[in-house]
Image (spheres, coloured by chain):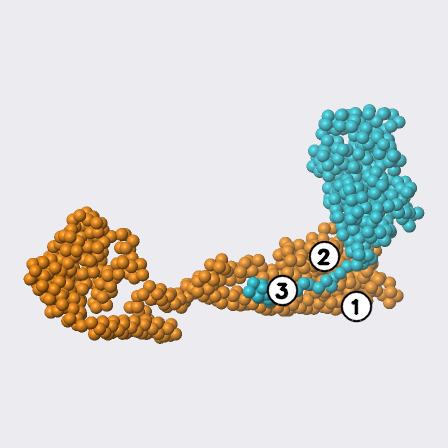
Chain colours: A orange, B cyan
Amino acid sequence: MRAVIRKSFKRELFLCFIVVALVPLVITGCFLVSILKARLSRDYEEKTQEQMVSVEMRMTGVFDEMEQVADEIMADAVIVDGITQTDSWLKNKAYNKLYEKTQDLREVAWFHVYDAQGRCSLSTSPQAAAGELPAYWGILKVARTHSQEMILRKASRVRQSSDGLCLQGARAILDEEDECLGFVVVDMTETHFETILSGAYDEQNGIAVLDSFWEDVYSTKMAKEEALAQTLRTRRMAGEDLRQITDGITFFIAPIEQTGLYLILGKEPVFTQDVTNMTIGVMMIMTVCSLLLCIVAAGMMSNYLTSPVKKLLQAMARVEGGDLDVQIKSSRKDEFGQLSASFDGMTRQIKENLVLQVRQQKELNDSNIAMMQAQLNPHFLYNTLDTIKWVAKAHHVSELATLASGLAKILRTSISEAQFISLSEEVSLVCAYMDIQKIRFDGNFSYDVELPLELEECMVPKMIIQPIVENAIIHGLKEREHGHIFLNIYEEQKTLYIEVYDDGCGMDESILGLLRARNREGLKGHIGFYNVDTIIRLHYGTQYGLYAENQAQGGARVQITLPVIQK
Amino acid sequence: MKKRMLRAAACLSAVLVILCSCGDEQAREEYHLEENNKLVIYTSHKEEIYGPIVKEFEERTGIWVEVVTGGTNDLLERIEEENGKDSGDIMFGGGVDSLNAYQDYFEPYICSQSDCLDDSYASADGVYTVFSKLPIVIVYNKKLVISAGTPRSWKDLTNSHWKGNVAFADPDRSGSSYTALLAMIQILSEDMSKEEVMEAFVINLDGDILSGSGEVLQEVTAGKKLIGITLEETVLKEIDQNADIGMIYPREGTASVPDGTALIKNAPHRENAELFIEFTVSEDVQRLLEDHLYRRSVRKGAENEEIKEMRYDLDYSEQYREEILTEWRALTGQ
């Protein structure tokens, strides 16, 4: 994987872009979520604490009032008298007093007056008899021993069903001699609790009131469903953590002052599984979206950055292959643009240098030839050959005359200053050459020349056909009894075609390959071909040149293409 | 390169962990309960019996009580299985015969108030401490049987006059039924052998044996059966709910086998358990049983009306248990 990435600049860039784009996103995402979570939890806890305080205030308010009313009842002689009264008129008076005293609180509690044996004597309960409470047992016993304060207990009524009864308060009524005359008992039912707490807390939350042993005194519907009280008590008994991770709700515990009771508030956790899942989901979607965006953007960006490099690389490869016409021509203005421009400049410069070098070389060659010409006066050679021709004619040795006049012709043309000669001159030169070779090879081959009249005055570089014909005679027709060479010249679409056919043994495939590849080193012995090709290319450009192939019926065909240039 | 990347990854994950963990703050354990402030009670009593007693015990001592409820036999088997490991502290409830049968798993404890308690069924080794008396009575439907025509004795129950009209639970399943059957056998043993008693009684049941003791009262109050044999407690409770039924203590005397409380071996909260046992036989609890819970006190000189009690032989009932139940099954065709 790493090796694959490291191999490409584009892939490296791509990966880099993705990492740079994604890592900050994920980190910020996590940051945001946890900050949000912490913040929400704190707000939530504060809000809950407020609710708990408000619930507690309501309850302690009611308890205080209850205690006051109980005090008033105890202090009222008519009511206390009424406890043991059998006279219905007096009892009725006591009842009137009791209702008068309790009128503010009857919505939130029932008041009873019990006699010293625990029998109910007076009651504001709408139900008939409140029954009896054992005076030696439970709340009455405690009230008797702690007569200075109101005792609050989880309500329990032995024998009768205590449906809906939640909390019981009791206070002993004592006379001056500390004798117990009876008890004021306050009963609070679920309905009473609902009245007290309505509006003090959020309905979605569960409220539970526990006694000092954490037994359920009052639970709202939600708290009952969640079995708040039982769960907490079991955990406290077992010594487990009160809050556990598996809880479906979070709860808050606070003691209610001076009552021995505890207030529990249970709440759906602010970060439920749903919310957490949603947050994670949103984050995932965001990540995927940005990943996609990132892939597209990174792809485009890395392409934008790497394409000039790629172009440059390709151009460089072409230059290496010898093509100096390569130009990148970038329209960019940045460093890549500058780089491309410098590259273009560089290839141009190299090409100019090359042309200059060739020209210098040529000048050098010219001066060499001039020097050689200076060493031996060519006119002397030419005149001597002419003399040989005439002596031969005088002695009727026609072959010698032909040889001498052919050689003189070739010599004259090759040493003439002109670089270009007409096609007819070139052809007659080739004919002279072939005549000489014919005599040399004892008439073993024949030749034909096809030169249209209108092309006779075309100008071509001198001595470009002779090396081809020489090759055909020396290599193609070697060891042949009878060979034939056909020189065909024609024009087609402003291009001059010069073709040399022979019916010899053809050319080696390896030579043809070397020719096509323009390999100078490999063409030893056929260097004439290479020279012709180079001369034509240098003069007319790369679209012209030399092309050789073997014919299907045997023998080779060499074709030279040139532009048609009339004199 | 690799090392650097690793280091970077480690730093990053550390930051993330810190970020994520700062929200979760575990609730402080401020409500820790000391171990010596706890008590675990196994009880087969109904909630209406153990509820007020346990609550009052908590209030008076400040000890937190965990109650594990279940049938007598289930709880005893559990105690046997636990064998003093991770077990409860106390077995509260169950007939003293049942408790005695599992005495290997209980710690002897002699209650400090044992002098004040009825000693007719007291355990000599202190395996259990008696809790309440549960006399067996004959119940009848007042609408269907005139009080002059009610059965008066155990002997009457074998009379063919009541054939098909007696509600009786299967002694195989109900402890009180077994006690009743044994009481009958022991009372009538002078005139009849136990097989004869059972045969005569089974004929009177006429093949209709109830599956649980709770059904006895249902059958009688509904008038499906005229009379039934059950515990005094259930009848009194039903009468208090204004059921039109009457109750007869058999003339020969009735079995009044108490239930009890026993200290489980290796109890983790032994001191608290002892406190609880003392509490169960205290004056207040025993008075509450009589006043409000339809039970008879085990304290001497209790205020309830005297009834004639037979001498129920616990050893006999234990010794012949299998034999009698096998015979019973054979007779009833089970």
Quadrant of the image containing the N terminus of chain B: bottom right
Q: Are marks 2 and 3 in contact (CB under 8 Å)?
A: no
The nearer-to-camera label among 1 and 2 is 2
Q: Amino acid at mark 1?
A: Ala
Provide the chain ID for the residue under circle 3. B
Q: Amino acid at mark 3?
A: Ser
Give how far apart the Cα atoms at labels 2 and 3 are: 22 Å
Which residue in the structure is indicated by mark 3?
B21
B237 and A460: which is toward the camera: A460
Which residue occupies 83% across, 48% down?
B266
The nearer-to-camera label among 2 and 3 is 3
Residue B190 lies left or right of residue A110; in this view the side is: right
Which residue in the structure is indicated by mark 2?
A240
Q: Is B115 situated above or below B171?
A: below
Q: Is residue A350 visible?
A: yes
**Local SS, label 1:** helix
Q: Amino acid at mark 2?
A: Glu
Residue A34 lies left or right of residue A293; in this view the side is: right
Quadrant of the image containing the C terminus of chain B: top right
Q: Position of residue B203 (x, y in %)?
A: 76, 25
B161 and B57: which is toward the camera: B57
Q: Position of residue A155 (x, y in %)?
A: 74, 57
Which residue in the structure is indicated by mark 1?
A75
Are the residues flagged by discs 2 and 3 from a single subunit? no
Give how far apart the Cα atoms at labels 1 and 2 are: 48 Å
Residue A282 lies left or right of residue B308; in this view the side is: left
